[in-house]
Each structure stands twice: as structure tokens, then as C-alpha cells.
Image (spheres, rainbow, N blue to C red):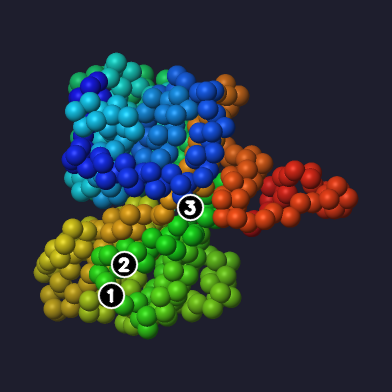
């Protein structure tokens, strides 16, 4: 704690570098800056205590400072052990008007390269406010903060915490140890925190899936807004964001030429589409694997070979998973990969690759090349290069999505936070999406920033296609 702000970051002296990059990012984040202007002097988030769990990057710093500008108090942690940019974390603690000796920013608990016990410790710090209370809003990416509150309450009231899938995983054991410790210190803490939360706004596909599962089971403890499925989020960040950051991660991690190589993309949803385009842009021959015939056909029509992983393992130089599913690349697959082939995952959790199986493989050895790049040596002498230990490699090996696309995503986050914080009484414990007119507003701001000219409907034309001159321009079921 310094100047009343508690924090755990790698190096606070990095704040000046962080501030310089934040200043450049602000220019590239016109959506967030527009909200600062629109709400100037209004403070719609006054009284909001937001606990945020989202990759602590430069872009997230601009989001955090927008939330503060709108009146919120904020505590933050990263939602991934490798995704923090240490200069961004330092800069949000110091704040735009503070110094290293007298920080005036927000409480932040994040550094690049956390261990799992440290990760869950930062999550608990982020949700525990200095007065002993909890947040009244959660901003989540992947659902870990939401899960901690839900499982914490379940542990306190029922004493059992079944994991949906991974009871014996190391990750789950670490998580249970944290719950046990917190229960010993303060039995009832998570129940109290759960009661104080007005709502959660969720950033990503995987977190949204977890929320719908909770809601379907009748177990969701507060209303949720699914930010991911705003069109200006998933059709932009998931797709065009990864188009930028996937190859950035491969380049920074390996510097291997992609042109002429065979790259396999597992999954052809939004992230898969951006990944395939990104690799093709480098001249790689891209092959797609899919379980869904619609997405598979899309891939085929886009000109990619569609195949099963098993059929293409002997030729693949690069394999990237984008499914949000588990065990997509098994250890048996890995053992059959080409010598020095590259394996990376950009789906939310590391269980897309059977990393646990790889560690247990008889006779396997690991040779660390540099942080977030490991060569795994099979007993045959054949090796594969695994990026970021199977975790989101576009954030682990590079710096994630660029500012402009994150401005779209985070504009939706700000809208969702204001909506739930101010109108939570109008919402049930269900999962909601933002109205289309707000999606169009976010798009409009970013189109203008790019100098795009939007055609205006005449009244006559609007009547003919049965929409309002000012929008929304599409029915809910339209897919873009
Ligand atoms: P999506 O649902 O649009 O796409 C996933 C696709 O994977 C689907 O088409 C599905 O049919 C396919 N799939 C499922 N199991 C498969 C299997 N065994 N083999 C082949 N294909 C399979 O989801 P979206 O939005 O593309 O997100 C995917 C993951 O990426 C999620 O975990 C999400 O949270 C994460 N994500 C990561 C980002 C990053 O920066 N790295 C950014 C945004 C999302």
C-alpha cells in the first residue's frame, strides 16, 4: 500500500513508459474517449465499485481510466498469468496525475508470469475492498471472477465445490486451496460479496458460455450482460483483433517464416476466421478443422482445405487452436507432429491443448528457449515448440489485440457497466445482450474515426425496407 492504494505489480518505475503508450493508445481508442466527453461532469458510475478481471494491457489501462473518469472506483487483476504488460500495470497504479512516490491511480494486482497460486491470490485481492466489503460491479473476461464469487458462496453454504470438468487438475486444486484459506479467514465473505454485486459484464465467448450454463441451472447470483455478442465486439475483436495479434505472437515467439508453410487452424468461428486470414496473409497454406458443418463449409468457400487434424499432422508446420473447447490437440497428436513444428492456442483456456498429458508423457523433456517459448523433446528426438505453455499466445508471446479494435469491445463494456450499475433493478438474474442501437452507435464512432462516410437513408427508403431513418437497421436475427 502506498498513498492509500494497494497494489502488486512487477515494477512501479515502469509507469512513465506505460503512460507514454497509454497516451498514444488514447488516440487509437476513439470510442472510449467519446464516452469520456459524453459523460463529462455527469459521473454515471459514481458509487460504482468495479472489480475487473481482464488482461492488464495498455488498452485495458485506457478502459480503466475511462471507468474512473465516469466516477467509478476500480480494483483490477489480469485474467491470464502471462497477459499483463508490466508498464501498463505500473501506469494505472500511479495514475495520470500521480508519481511513483505518491500514486493516485487504482489498486491493481497483475504482473507478467504469475504462478497459479499467485493468480488466484490476485483474483481475491481484486474482489476484496480495503474496507472489507466487496465490489458492486464485476467486469469479467473468461468468467474467473464470477466463478470465484459463485464457487466461494457455494463452498460457504454447501461445503462442496464440484468442478464442471477438472476435479483432479492442478489448476482446480490451487483454486480449492484458495477457497479453503479464505473460508478459514472469514467464513461468509463470498456470500456477502455475492449479495453486494449488482451485475457482471462479460467480455469473451468462453465466459459467456459459463454464464449461460449458470443461468440455465438457475444458479446465476446476479444479472449479466453478454458483451461478447455485441456485433461490434465478437465480429471485430475476435476476428480482426486476432488477425493482427496471432501472427505477432508467432513472430515474436519464434521468428519463423510463415510463407510456404502449412498452418492448421482448429475451429472456424470468429477467432478461427481471423486466424486463418492472418496466416494466409503471411503466405502460409492454411487448413481448417471444424466440427460444425456450417463453419466448415464457410472455410471451404473461403478457399481453405477442410480436414481432420489426424490427416494433416504429418505435414503441419504450425497448429493453432481457436475453439474454446478442451483436448482439441491431444498428446497423441503432439507426438505425431513434425520436427520443430509450432503449437499455440488462442482459445481462452489452456485445456484446448492437452498440456497435462504432455507433461506426463513417458520420457518427455522440456527445454525452455525464452519466457513463453518451450521446446518439448520426445524420446524419439523429435521436438515441438509450444507457445505460452498452451495459454492465449497472442497475449503471452505478443501484446494482444491493438487499441483500435479494443476500443470497440471496451466501448460495449462501458455501456454495459453504466446500464447494469444504474438500472440493475430492471434486470433478473439472467444473461442479457445490449440493444442493437448501442452497437450501431459504437460502430458509428469508429467508422467516423477512420474517415468513413455513411450513406443516409431517405425517409422513403426507410419506409420501404421498414426501418427507422436513424436505425436500428437490421432485425435481431440478422447475422452480419
Ligand atoms: P466461436 O464459437 O465463434 O468459434 C469456435 C469454433 O470452434 C466453433 O465454430 C466450433 O464449432 C469450433 N469447434 C468446437 N470444438 C471443436 C473441435 N473439437 N475441433 C474443431 N473445431 C471445434 O468462438 P470464438 O468467438 O471464435 O472464440 C473462440 C475462443 O477464443 C473462446 O475461448 C474465446 O473466449 C476465445 N477468444 C480469444 C481471444 C484472444 O485474444 N485470444 C479473443 C476473443 C475470443
Residue at the (26%, 41%) spot, across then down? 16
Label 2: which residue? Answer: 250
| For residue 133, above or below residue 84 | above
Residue 256's mark? 1
Whichever of labels 3 and 2 marks the residue nearer the N terminus, that label is: 2
Q: Secondary structure at mark 2?
A: helix
Quarter location, residue 126: top left
Q: Position of residue 201 (x, y in %)?
A: 48, 36
Q: Residue at x 27, y 19 (%)?
A: 130
Distance in Å between CA atoms under marks 3 and 2? 20 Å
Q: Residue 112: horizontal and vertical position, in percent?
A: 23, 47
Q: Categorize mark 3 by other alpha carbons within 10 Å: few (<14), some (14-19), many (20+).
A: many
Drawn side of residue 62 relative to residue 56, left or right:
right
Closer-to-camera residue (212/44): 44
Q: Which mark is residue 405?
A: 3
Disc nearer the start of the sequence (1/3) = 1
Q: Circle 3 — which element? A: helix
Viewer-side label of 3, 2? 3
Residue 86's tag is none
Amino acid at each position: 500500500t502506498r498513498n492509500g492504494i494497494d497494489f502488486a505489480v512487477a515494477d512501479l518505475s515502469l509507469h512513465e513508459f506505460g503512460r507514454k503508450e497509454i497516451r498514444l493508445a488514447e488516440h487509437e481508442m476513439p470510442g472510449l474517449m467519446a464516452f469520456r466527453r459524453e459523460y463529462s461532469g455527469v459521473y454515471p458510475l459514481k458509487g460504482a465499485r468495479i472489480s475487473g478481471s481482464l488482461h492488464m494491457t495498455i488498452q485495458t489501462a485506457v478502459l480503466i481510466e475511462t471507468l474512473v473518469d465516469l466516477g467509478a472506483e476500480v480494483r483490477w487483476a489480469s485474467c491470464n498469468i502471462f497477459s499483463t504488460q508490466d508498464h501498463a500495470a505500473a501506469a494505472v497504479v500511479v495514475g495520470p496525475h500521480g508519481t511513483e512516490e505518491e500514486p493516485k491511480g487504482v489498486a491493481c494486482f497483475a504482473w507478467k508470469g504469475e504462478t497459479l497460486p499467485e493468480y488466484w491470490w490476485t483474483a481475491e485481492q481484486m474482489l476484496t475492498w480495503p474496507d472489507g466489503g466487496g465490489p458492486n460491479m464485476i467486469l469479467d473476461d473468461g468468467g474467473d471472477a464470477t466463478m470465484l464469487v459463485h464457487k466461494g458462496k457455494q463452498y460457504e453454504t454447501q461445503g462442496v465445490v464440484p468442478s464442471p470438468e477438472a476435479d483432479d487438475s492442478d489448476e482446480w486444486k490451487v483454486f480449492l486451496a484458495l477457497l479453503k484459506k479464505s473460508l478459514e479467514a472469514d467464513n461468509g465473505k463470498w456470500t456477502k460479496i455475492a449479495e453486494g454485486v449488482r451485475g457482471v459484464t462479460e467480455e469473451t465467448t468462453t465466459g459467456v458460455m459459463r454464464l449461460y450454463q449458470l443461468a440455465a441451472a438457475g444458479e446465476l447470483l446476479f444479472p449479466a450482460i453478454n458483451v461478447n455478442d455485441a456485433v461490434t465486439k465478437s465480429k471485430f475483436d475476435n476476428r480482426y483483433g486476432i488477425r493482427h495479434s496471432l501472427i505477432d505472437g508467432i513472430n515474436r515467439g519464434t521468428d519463423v517464416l510463415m510463407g510456404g508453410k502449412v498452418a492448421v487452424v482448429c475451429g472456424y468461428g470468429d477467432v478461427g476466421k481471423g486466424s486463418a486470414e492472418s496466416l494466409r496473409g503471411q503466405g502460409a497454406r492454411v487448413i481448417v478443422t471444424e466440427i460444425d458443418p456450417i463453419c466448415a463449409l464457410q472455410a471451404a468457400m473461403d478457399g481453405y482445405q477442410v480436414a481432420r487434424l489426424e490427416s494433416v499432422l504429418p505435414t503441419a508446420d504450425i497448429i493453432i487452436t481457436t475453439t474454446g473447447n478442451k483436448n482439441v490437440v491431444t498428446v497423441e497428436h503432439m507426438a505425431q507432429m513434425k520436427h520443430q513444428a509450432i503449437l499455440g492456442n488462442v482459445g481462452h483456456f489452456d485445456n484446448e491443448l492437452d498440456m497435462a498429458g504432455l507433461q506426463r508423457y513417458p520420457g518427455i523433456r522440456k527445454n525452455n528457449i525464452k519466457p513463453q517459448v518451450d521446446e518439448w523433446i520426445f524420446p524419439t528426438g523429435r521436438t515441438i515448440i509450444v507457445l505460452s505453455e498452451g495459454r492465449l499466445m497472442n497475449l503471452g508471446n505478443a501484446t494482444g489485440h491493438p487499441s483500435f479494435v479494443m476500443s470497440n469491445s471496451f466501448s460495449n463494456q462501458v455501456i454495459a457497466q453504466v446500464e447494469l450499475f444504474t438500472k440493475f433493478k430492471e434486470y433478473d438474474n439472467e444473461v442479457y445482450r445490449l440493444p442493437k442501437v448501442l452497437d450501431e452507435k459504437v460502430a458509428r464512432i469508429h467508422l467516423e474515426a477512420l474517415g468513413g462516410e455513411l450513406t443516409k437513408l431517405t425517409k422513403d427508403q426507410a419506409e420501404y425496407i421498414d426501418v427507422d431513418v436513424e436505425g436500428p437497421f437490421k432485425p435481431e436475427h440478422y447475422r452480419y
